[in-house]
Every structure is written in C-alpha cells, then in structure tokens.
Amino acid sequence: MRGDKRERILRVLLNNKEYLSKNELSKQAECTRQWFILFLKELKKKKLIRDTEPINRKKLLQYWINIPKKPKKFRSYMVKKSLEILKKVKLDYALTTYQAENIIQHYLFPSRIDLYIKESDLDKWHSIMTKNGLYGKGNVRIIVTDEYIMYGKKNIGGLSIVSIPQLIIDLIKEGGPCQESAEMLMKRAD
C-alpha cells in the first residue's frame, strides 16, 4: 500500500492547479495527514515541491515513473464496437494508454483499449465483455487496480479518460511509441 499512497499523493499534487492546504490535499489523497506530511518532506528534500505545490511537474512525473509497481491484475477480451459499449455502460472506468492518448492527442493508433475498473465491478465487467465478445487475448484489456487511479479523470465524447499525469505515467510504462507520445504530453504539462 505504501506505493499506492505515494501515487495517490502524486496524482493529487499533479492534478490540482490551485493552492491547497496539507489538510485538503491529504483528504483528497485519502491518506492520513501524518503520512502525507512525511512524504511531502521526502519530495521537498528532492526539490520537487515547495510547500504543497510542484516546482517542476516534469521532474515530479519522472519521480513517479520510478516508483516500483506491483503487477496489475487484468483480463483481455475481443469485443466489436467496444467504444460504443463503453459509452452506454453505467459502471465506473477510466481509459488509458492507446485509446486515451488518441482521444487526447491523436498521435498513437488505438490498437488496444485499456481501461481501469474497480475490483468490486470485475464480475459485472466480465459479464458485459463476454456478452458482447470473447474472453482471451484481444483488443480490450480491463485492469483491476486501486480505484484512486481514476482521480482527476475527464469525460470526453461520452468516454471516461484518466488524468493527463496518469496517462503520461501509463504511456511511459507501456514503452515503444507510447513513450514518445508521453514525452509530447509532458511538454504540455509545464
């Protein structure tokens, strides 16, 4: 959970444009004020933040990239008209990597649809995907993770998309052409 808490805090710091107090930020990150302050001290030592504001967003993103990740639990499906299904679904989700980048920046070919879901919704998602397609390696990957990954998500064209900082991290972790796209998005993050 330590890595998850750090990521929650970084997500909150990078998504808020106005000044917020330590109390407000720790509440938004859903972690104790004490834990929040300890992590802020670590970030201040590395000269990544001043008080509760990022000094350099790119360096803060680079720091985030290097936080060790535990393997994500996911399932793959082959589903026709998957975006139409996502626009109609009433469950919480957030698109990331190829499809999200294509909607935001139009640089990558959306060869796969990756979406984050809440673990409590996994059975419902499995039912929706198998009703509309086939289970196994395909064009849709649902990723079960800390639901806080959806913090700062946006709705664009009826689709839910992760925040820009989260998208940058996910693209860099994906590698290849995604890394180049992430660098383009980082230039806009300043």
Image (cartoon, rainbow, N blue to C red):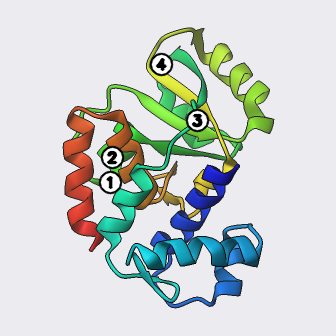
Please provide percent x and percent y for residue 169. Answer: 40, 50
Residue 178 shown left or right of residue 46 in the figure? left
Sequence-wise first label, 1 or 3: 3
Q: Are marks 4 and 1 in contact (CB under 8 Å)?
A: no
Residue marked by disc 3? 70
Nearer mark to the viewer, of 1 and 3:
3
Category of crowding for the residue at label 1, using alpha-carbon neighbours closer than 10 angstroms: few (below 14), some (14–19), many (at least 20): few
Q: Does residue 98 appear in this view?
A: yes
Camera-side residue of 79 and 2? 2
Q: State how far apart marks 3 and 2 are (Cα).
A: 23 Å
Category of crowding for the residue at label 2, using alpha-carbon neighbours closer than 10 angstroms: few (below 14), some (14–19), many (at least 20): many
Residue marked by disc 1? 104
Q: State how far apart marks 4 and 1 are (Cα).
A: 22 Å
Residue 23 shown left or right of residue 110 in the figure? right
Residue marked by disc 2? 101
Q: Does residue 106 appear in this view?
A: no
Q: Are marks 2 and 1 in contact (CB under 8 Å)?
A: yes
